[in-house]
Structures are given as C-alpha cells and as structure tokens.
Amino acid sequence: MPAFLPETASPTGLNLEDTATAFAYKTTTDLQRGRLLFRSIGVPFLARLGPRMVNTAVRWGLPVRGMVRRYFFDQFCGGYTLEEALATATKLHGFGVQSTLDYAVEAQKNREGYDRCKQEVLQAIEVAQARPEVAFVAIKLTGLGNIHALTAAQRGELTTMDQAEFDAMAMRLDEICHYAATRRQPVLIDAEESWIQGMIDKLAEDMMLAYNETSPIVYTTLQMYRHDRLAYLHYLTEKFTRQNRLLGVKLVRGAYLEKENRRAQEKGYPTPMQPNKAATDAAFNAAAHHIVTHLDRIALCAGTHNEQSCLLIAGEMARMGMAPNHPHVTFSQLYGMSDHISFNLAARGYHVAKYLPYGPLEETMPYLFRRAEENTSIAGQSSRELRLIDQELKRRRKTRKP
C-alpha cells in the first residue's frame, strides 16, 4: 500500500475544530434542534423504533408532518422541491460551500415513476449549470429503472422483459449524461448494493467513456468498504488512460455494511466487505493517495466524514505544491452532518460540496432512515456532532453581549 501522510499531519492552519466557522450559517435555535435530534438518534432504542413510528404516522395521515420537518427533515434535507433546495444551496454558498443536488426519491415502481425521476434530474441539471452554488447533480440508478432488471443483468439471467427494462434504464441514464455534457454540468452516479453494483459500474464506465473526453462530467462512485474497490480503481485508471478519457471518481466508505454482511450470511457467499473499519480506512486513504497523484487524469470527489482522511488529502495536496482550490478535488459531506469539516475546509479555499437531498417527505423517508442508522452504526458519529454543537453553544453564551 502506498505511503501517505502520518495521521498527525495536517496543513498549517487547517483547524477542523473551529466551531464558530463550522456553524456560522446556523442560528442558535437551529443548533438546539440539532442537539435534540442527535441526542435522540444516539440512543439505539429510539433510532430503531423512531423511523418506524414516523413512517406509520405519516402513512396514516396523523398530524406529525410539521414536527418531522422541523426536527428531522430540515436537518438532513434541503427542501421538498428543487426551488427550496436551491434556496438552501444559496445560503450555504454565502459561506463558501457548494451543493450537490440530489433528488432523493429511490426505488421507483413503474415507467411513470422512472420518467418523473429522470425529468427531475434533467431539471436540476438545467438550473445547476447557471448556478455557482451547485457543484454536482446526483443520479441514483434505482430511481431510473427496475431494480429487478439490474439484478437479473448482473446475474446474466435477463428475460426479454428484463432486457427491455434494463435498456430503458440505460437510455434514461444516457439522456441525462448527454444533457449534462451539453451543459458542462458534472453529475455523480451513486453506488448501491453489491448485487446490482456490477451493472451500475458498467453503465457508469460507458457514460464516462462517452462524455469525459475533455473534462470530468460523469463520476462513478467507489465504496471502499468493499475489499475489491482499490484494485478496481487501478483497473479504471489504466483503462481510461488507454482510452484517453478523464476518470471521475467519488470516493466513499459505504452505507450498507450491515445489510451487505447479513445478506452474504443468509445466502451463504463470502461477504464483499472489508474485514474491519481499519481496513476500510486504509483502502480509502490509499485510493485517495492514488487519485491525488494522478490528478491530470482523475478528478476526485472525496465523500467522507472522517477528519483524518480530509487532512491527509489536504496535506498531500500541500506536499505536491497544489493550490487548495485545485479544479479536480472536491470534498463532500452530507447536509446536516460534519459541518466542522465542510465549512472549515471551505474557509481555507478548498472546494466543498454538501450533499443536498430534496423531495416529498413521504418519498425521502428511505434516505432519512439511513441517516438515522448511519449515526448509530458509525462509532462516535452522534457523540461527535453533539460535542461540537455543545462547544459552539457554550462559545455563543460566553461571547453574547449583555
């Protein structure tokens, strides 16, 4: 594994603990609501039952929408509509942080739903290309086509009907990527579960080969909690170098760990996951190092809430004499989380894009539930958010004028 900076290394003056900068865009009321939320989802019992209770209440039409929006939805989502999300993006941009527009409606059930999702993404691209506050537009394949067709394609068991569904999905994706290329608007193809990811990888490669001739328009996503992803990154680097195309890569650790391990155990196949978190961290950092040393051929979107990984990337850029605002490096964190990373990096001149989901409350529930699960399954996530919020509230009390 290539050498990288030691964990204690960081560029001079880059302080990710500066809560005044991290939370400048939030009111004290916002912070108090966030504190209540993270205290709640930090309790495993509440985190397990809370989303189910909310989902049931919304489905039954109980009057909980206002409470859910104020204390949960608004923490992690930019709004119900594209217009509301753009207003949130404009607010973030006032503090130097861009956004990734993500129409967070997943797993559509029919052609009408797939086409509606496609039109939403096309509309986001149309408005984003003229808005400096937007860095990327996200694409989720399970919003554009039949998940059964993806699964069948990966198994090599396509029926005639499955093939038609798969081809329609590929055409929707191509229409989006072609439109993005004509508007010079970068798009991120999200990664999903391993049993459909092989076909998503193939489609993403096809799109990057077609549209990344002179600039990185299409990005694929590599989940580094999979043990095969570092080798896949090296394969992609060689392939795209031969084809004289630019490679766009969003690096993440991954969001389906428990689901992946459980399915592998139930079906009796070796888990595709790394053996432990340390191996995942090492793979992520090695992949980041590889990309930073090949920025002439690869563009990086570093999707991470890990402080050390961010400091390592920034430190490697500094060692190589690169400016913080290198056009091929963007840091990315989820909206509502890790503001201490996002805003402190942005204040030092790095490109940062908050992942900004939006969509109707009922249809964004799967996304919101994953955020609750993520905060309980990742060691220290909720406690870290709470510590920083408490630190900032204490600072504000001390500096408040009489």
Image (cartoon, rainbow, N blue to C red):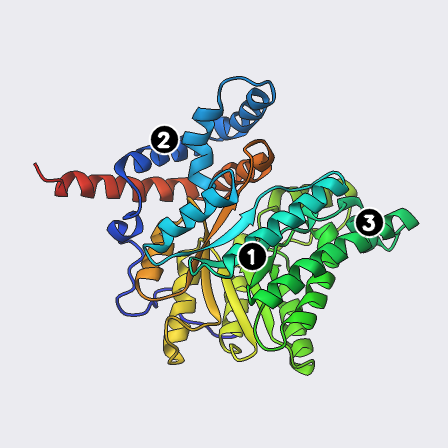
Compared to residue 355, the image places residue 239 above or below, namely below
Residue that badge 1 annotates: 126
Q: Give x and y (percent) for residue 374.
A: 51, 42
* Whole-number angstrom distance, CA of label 2 to CA of label 1: 37 Å
Q: Residue at x 55, y 49 (%)?
A: 102
Q: Which of marks 1 and 3 is in front?
A: 1
Q: Can you tell which quarter of the image residue 174 is in?
A: bottom right
* Whole-number angstrom distance, CA of label 1 to CA of label 3: 26 Å
Q: Give x and y (percent) for residue 97.
A: 38, 57
Q: Can you tell which quarter of the image residue 7 is in?
A: bottom left
Mark 2: secondary structure: helix
Residue that badge 3 annotates: 165
Number of numbered discs present? 3
Amino acid beneath label 2: Leu
Compared to residue 13, the image places residue 242 above or below, namely below
Instruction: Specify the quadrant that holds the C terminus.
Output: top left
Is residue 218 visible from the viewing direction of this image? no
